[in-house]
Amino acid sequence: MTAARGTAREHAAVADLPESGHWYELHEVDDGVVRITEPQVDKLLRANLWWLRGTDRDIVVDAGLGVASLRREIPRLFERDPLVILTHSHLDHVGGAHEFRERAAHSAAVEVLAAGVPASLYGAELYAKLGIDAAGEPVPDLLINALPHPAYDPRTYHPGPITVTHPLQEGDTVDAGGRTLTVLHLPGHTPGCIGLLEERTGALYSGDVIYNGDLIDDLPESDPPTYRRSLRRLAGLDVSVVHPGHGRSFGPQRLRELTRGYLSGTAS
């Protein structure tokens, strides 16, 4: 009886959703850097993709939720056979990774990605799969507020296994021509979390290690003591700007405030 009601509620929720004309929005941030967002996604999973244009090839940092095809919606993103680098193994960052010929991630994330990451577009189901305790807070029924096309069924959503073609380690570099990223292994949120530092410009692509919001350290794979060490490391970095996995970019002062707030237990 309960299952039947839940299914009816899911059908009603989907039936009420409009079709999205454009699933992705592109925001030119800097010379050769574009932030790609998915505005129709609930804020819990609304992550950034970062498109970096080098002189030899392009790099895409993270691959979004994978609800709508990147190739179909942004064909020019693939004109120079970009390498996608996954900052960690959560659905909102890896969902579109299968569309790229070459995929890089930290070696600690390889097995998780190959097995297929826990995923659902339904709030309660996703919380259960990820081991998230809502702590009395309301859980969204559906984690998208539009459909990429009229026939889309959110119940069929599943990113599937992802094969990493380039396992990464601390200190590795990725050269796109005129743009080189250095891999920083920053575990804690997940074991395979990385940041990418462009030392020439001081830009840090931080994934979910640091962003302007509540940092998540209570997932089954999270390790708070390790996370604290990663944030202490970030606090000492010489950066000009942080391009995070969620939300807008921020400068070094805000980076210090966020790391200090977490480490002191007074994050805001």
Image (spheres, grey):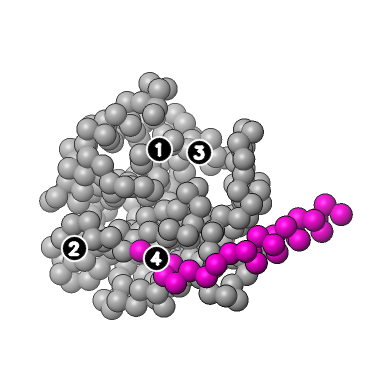
Q: Is residue 135 left or right of residue 65?
A: right
Residue at image x 36%, y 31%? 229
- Specify the label residue 222 is tagged with: 3
- How many angstroms separate mark 1 from mark 2 (CA)? 26 Å
- To which quarter of the image does residue 33 belong? bottom left
Q: Read off the residue under disc 4.
A: 24
- Quarter of the image with the N terminus is bottom right
Q: Amino acid type of disc 1? A: Gly
Q: Amino acid type of disc 3? A: Ser
Residue 129 in the image, given as x and y percentages of width and height: 63, 49
Q: Amino acid type of disc 4? A: Tyr
Residue 44 in view: yes
Q: Read off the residue under disc 1.
A: 213
Nearer the observer: mark 2 or 4; the answer is 4
**Around disc 1, counting alpha carbons within 10 Å, would you say few (fewer than 14), some (14 to 19), or many (20 or more)?**
few
**Around disc 4, counting alpha carbons within 10 Å, would you say few (fewer than 14), some (14 to 19), or many (20 or more)?**
many
Residue 11 in the image, given as x and y percentages of width and height: 70, 64
Q: Amino acid type of disc 2? A: Gly
As for residue 123 lying within the magenta part, the answer is: no
- Disc 1 on helix, strand or loop? loop
Image: 27 above or below 123: below
User: What residue span does the magenta drawing correspond to?
Assistant: 1-25
As for residue 20 lying within the magenta part, the answer is: yes
- Disc 2 on helix, strand or loop? loop
Residue at image x 27%, y 35%? 255
- Disc 4 on helix, strand or loop? loop
User: Between 202 and 16, which is closer to the camera in this rendering?
Assistant: 16
